[in-house]
Image: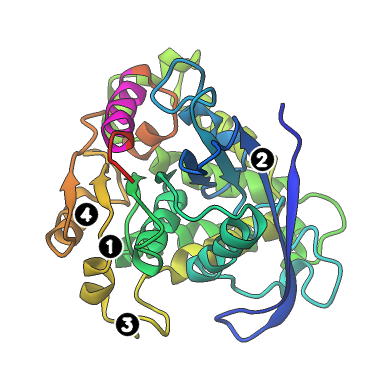
């Protein structure tokens, strides 16, 4: 395992109106080339961390640490970078401010340009909220991004998508051991309630109807619920809420550069882009991405044809990984 690294941003002013010191935790894999031209950025996703994104790369795969310098960065709120569970001031726990996708990318930009002194990223890719960060990168810093692969994500949260994650968080907040965010020991009942709701959305209807879960060594829908609960038990409850607040606020145009003009933000993404939703995803929909592609200068919609739902982008199904690798290979061929 590569050692985790830290990059500190002093006195950052968030979009929500708070000024605080922020720390990005990240790992790097491979060696930066002498001309600094082989850098690939992978932001983490909801409930995930830099270790969880390792399914996207390996020696011999399209994204290969023996050829590329891979930067796996933790989004704020995930328990590694600055989060409710690790900040030691008035913003700890339930008092943590909303840190937006824009805030995440602005701070990552400082890491890349000042910390690592990389002038251009060969590829930015990510799954789910990692895809949202990739899209934000493309809009804010088109001169720095050579190619984009957003997987099972979007450029803004859709109304039904927002309702889904808000509903799951509301269930978490109602469980007694959550104590309005002021718990003194992990509120596992609250997290398990959240995981129970999430399990129905992470996978598709066909995943359950065709008993695809047996490929994970699971024998029933109840096992799928327990599988999802176990995954989220590694997260702090307030961290889950913080990341959900990032999720429900995301829109790549909600910043001073685009002032809410979504079409303008999309048209600013000049990088070669393959947008890869899953055709059975229950909350990041192909139709949303199809509308986004129309406003982007050099983008193609290539849906994953999979019965795994949103989890098609999560590395658990070999054929879905092969499709993602094919897109990565194509995009890495783009000249800087």
Dot 1 and dot 4 residues touching (CB under 8 Å)? no
Spatial distance from mark 4 to mark 2, Cα to Cα? 30 Å
* Above-or-below relation of 320 to 299: above
- CA gap between label 2 and label 1 equals 26 Å
- Left or right, 245 with reference to 184: left
Residue 321 included in the magenta stretch of the image: yes
Q: Which mark is residue 310?
A: none
- Dot 4 and dot 2 residues touching (CB under 8 Å): no
Q: Main secondary structure of the magenta part?
A: helix
The residue at which mark 4 appears reads as 289
Dot 1: what SS? loop
Q: Residues within 10 Å of mark 3 (few under 14, many from 20)?
A: some
- The nearer-to-camera label among 4 and 2 is 2
The magenta segment: 319-331
Q: Which mark is residue 260?
A: 3
Q: Earlier in the sequence, mark 3 or mark 1?
A: 3
Please say if the residues under marks 3 and 1 sit with CB atoms less than 8 Å apart: no
The residue identified by callout 1 is 269
Q: Which mark is residue 27?
A: 2
Residue 3: quarter of image: top right
282 falls in the magenta region: no
Q: Residues within 10 Å of mark 4 (few under 14, many from 20)?
A: many
Element carrying mark 2: strand
Q: Quadrant of the N terminus?
A: top right
């Amino acid at each position: 395992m590569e050692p985790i690294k830290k990059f500190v941003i002093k006195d950052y002013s968030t979009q929500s109106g708070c000024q605080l010191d922020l720390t990005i935790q990240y790992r790097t894999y491979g060696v930066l080339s002498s001309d600094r031209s082989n850098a690939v950025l992978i932001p983490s996703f909801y409930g995930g961390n830099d270790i969880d994104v390792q399914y996207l790369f390996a020696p011999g795969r399209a994204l290969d640490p023996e050829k590329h310098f891979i930067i796996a960065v933790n989004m704020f709120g995930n328990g590694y970078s600055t989060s409710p569970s690790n900040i030691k001031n008035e913003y700890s726990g339930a008092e943590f401010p909303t840190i937006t996708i824009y805030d995440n990318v602005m701070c990552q930009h400082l890491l890349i340009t000042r910390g690592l002194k990389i002038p251009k990223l060969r590829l930015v890719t990510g799954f789910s909220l990692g895809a949202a960060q990739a899209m934000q990168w493309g809009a804010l810093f088109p001169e720095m991004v050579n190619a984009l692969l957003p997987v099972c994500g979007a450029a803004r949260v859709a109304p039904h998508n927002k309702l889904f994650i808000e509903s799951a968080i509301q269930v978490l907040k109602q469980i007694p051991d959550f104590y309005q965010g002021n718990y003194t020991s992990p509120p596992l009942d609250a997290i398990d309630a959240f995981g129970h709701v999430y399990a129905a959305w992470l996978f598709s209807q066909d995943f359950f109807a065709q008993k695809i879960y047996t490929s994970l060594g699971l024998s029933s829908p109840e096992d799928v619920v327990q599988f999802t609960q176990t995954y989220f038990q590694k997260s702090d409850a307030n961290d889950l809420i913080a990341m959900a607040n990032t999720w429900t606020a995301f829109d790549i145009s909600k910043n001073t550069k685009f002032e809410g003009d979504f079409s303008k933000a999309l048209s600013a993404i000049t990088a070669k882009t393959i947008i890869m939703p899953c055709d059975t995803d229950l909350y990041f929909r192909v139709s949303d991405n199809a509308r986004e592609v129309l406003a982007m200068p050099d983008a193609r919609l290539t849906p994953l044809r999979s019965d795994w739902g949103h989890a098609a982008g999560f590395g658990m199904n070999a054929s879905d990984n092969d499709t993602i690798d094919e897109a990565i290979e194509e995009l890495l061929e783009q000249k800087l």
